[in-house]
Image: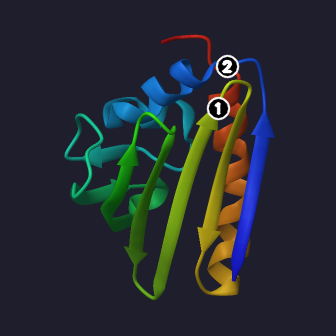
Amino acid sequence: MHLRVEVRGPASAEVMWSAYADTSRWSGWAPQIRRIDPEGPLVEGMEGQVHGPWGTNAHFEVSLVDRAAGRWAWRVHAGPAHLGIHHEVADGVTAVEIQGPAPFVLAYAPVARLALERLARSTRD
């Protein structure tokens, strides 16, 4: 299944990109993320663990980072859940495209929307 979630808000593309570009900031706007290992700059080929609520963990690999286009993508794997997630930012809009088995995509979409709403309201660079 493939699903796109798009959110509009006052944040500029640069502010939203800055929130993505430093993984140590993700837990500040994405409620499903407690921390990322390793923390640091978002780079293509980066691999690690996403630590979520209630002790949940997922392995990830960043497959694309294109700052100029405001796009990045990663693959996330937790048990039987395997998702491809593509992020985009532009002035006043941020979106995520989620691809994977329907039950996991549908379960993740509302959580992604909440995180994007928080990101789109960001004012801190």
Residue at the image point whose x is 62% and y is 30% from the top: 119
Residue 75 disc label: none
Q: Is residue 106 above or below residue 26?
A: below
The amino acid type, in three-letter code, at marker 1 is Ala
Disc 2 element: loop
Work out how far the residue at label 1 is from the one at label 2, CA to CA, in angstroms. 9 Å
* Residue picked out by circle 2: 11
68 relative position to 50: left or right: right
Location of the N terminus (image quadrant): bottom right
Residue 90 disc label: 1
Residue at the image point whose x is 71% and y is 62% from the top: 109
Disc 1 element: strand
123 relative position to 117: left or right: left
**Precedes in sequence: disc 1 or disc 2:** 2
20 relative position to 6: left or right: left
The amino acid type, in three-letter code, at marker 2 is Ala
